[in-house]
Amino acid sequence: MKKLLEKAGKTIVETCSQLKPKEVVSIITDKDSIDIGMLIKRHASEISTNIHVHILDDYGERPLRSFPKEIRADLKKSDVTYYTAHAKKDEFLIGRLIMLATKNGREIHMPNIDDTILKTGMQANYYKIASLTFMIMGIAVKSKTARVITPNGTDLNVKFSNKLKWIPDAGLLWHKGMWGNLPAGEVFTCPESVDGVMVVDGTLGAFFCEKYGDLKKTPIKIPIQNSKAEIENISCENEELLFEFRKYLQLVENADRVGEFACGTNIALKEFVGNILQDEKFPGVHLAFGSPISEKTGAKWNAGTHVDGVMQNCSLWFDEKQILDNGKFIEEEIYSIY
């Protein structure tokens, strides 16, 4: 187990962020993730001597209501920022943190990361993940539509706009201005339109994944029309989850609008773990309601929320070309295009 954790730490620091000597490092962690924060510090210390560690709980009761000035000051001068902390309901620090971190350097984003993820998703060969990710992106950027179905009832028709960018998230975050989640492995865009039914039987993002985990036994059925969730028609056997999810989709303007369509490409993953950080990278499809990550996709609208929903055992077609069958990439179809 220790060898796996150390390999993950080395991958994060040396492969994914490609930390260089003399670079300034900031590590943002919390009491729940302190061991992982220290793992990163240990590996970063083998390369750089200028490392600052901030524990969010030291700045007051969580969720924090303001951005700590000490963290803000360090982010402005850091070349690499590693964020490893647990998401807290109503703690809206992430957007500002990423903005500050990427203005001067790059940000390695790992909310809710845990030992399970380190021992699974962070054991991947990220050069192989990058290769597949860019191949899928090559198919996606030429496509006008997508179709997604699952055995549990998902049936979605998606349209894309050539005015909105496809973004590869391959985990190789080497340059100023870059940021991305680890574990990595997806390609995403803001869709022009989505219609149909989405059944989230994998994992739900934001604070929901930590509270509810894997939703296989209590999936959420979400009708979508003109890219908007039909909130009153959403159904789920878990009434508490249903209430909280409906409420979340009404927090701010566009919280109920589909802002992301993504295809997971981390072929090292073999099962869902109930953590959105990793499960959204599973070979398959996920949608997110809320923010379209406009700074990357070029969308002309925004939202102050973002919640991903992962579907299991996806079959996916780009235009008429099927590339996923029941959660498995059809390699001969992918390679035949090139």
Image (cartoon, helix red, strand yellow):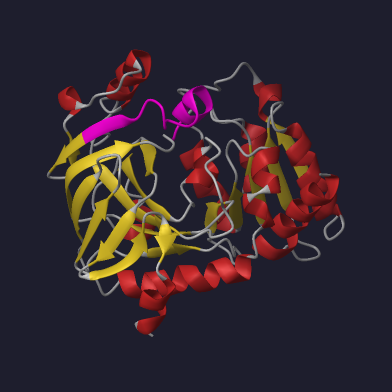
Residue 12 in view, yes or no: yes
**Residue 151 spot, x, y in % from top left:** 30, 44
Q: How many marks?
A: 0
**Residue 285 spot, x, y in % from top left:** 36, 52
Task: Judge by depth and name the residue closer to the eye, 29 or 194.
Answer: 194
Q: Residue at x 39, y 75 (%)?
A: 334
Task: Judge by depth and name the residue closer to the eye, 164 or 170.
Answer: 170
**Residue 203 spot, x, y in % from top left:** 44, 36
Q: Is residue 193 left or right of residue 204?
A: left
Please tell me whether residue 207 belongs to the stretch shown in magenta.
yes
Residue 253 in view, yes or no: no
Q: Residue at x 57, y 61 (%)?
A: 171
Please tell me whether residue 226 belongs to the stretch shown in magenta.
no
Farthest residue to the bottom: give it: 338
Which corner quadrant holds the C terminus?
A: bottom left
**Residue 174 spot, x, y in % from top left:** 62, 66
Q: Is residue 83 left or right of residue 224?
A: right
Q: Residue at x 84, y 51 (%)?
A: 3
Which corner quadrant holds the N terminus?
A: top right
Task: Judge by depth and name the residue closer to the eye, 91 or 67.
Answer: 91
Task: Judge by depth and name the residue closer to the eye, 256 or 124.
Answer: 124
Q: Is residue 96 left or right of residue 128?
A: left
- Magenta residues, as a range? 205-222
Q: Residue at x 78, y 55 (%)?
A: 7
Q: Is residue 27 left or right of residue 226?
A: right
Farthest residue to the left: give it: 226
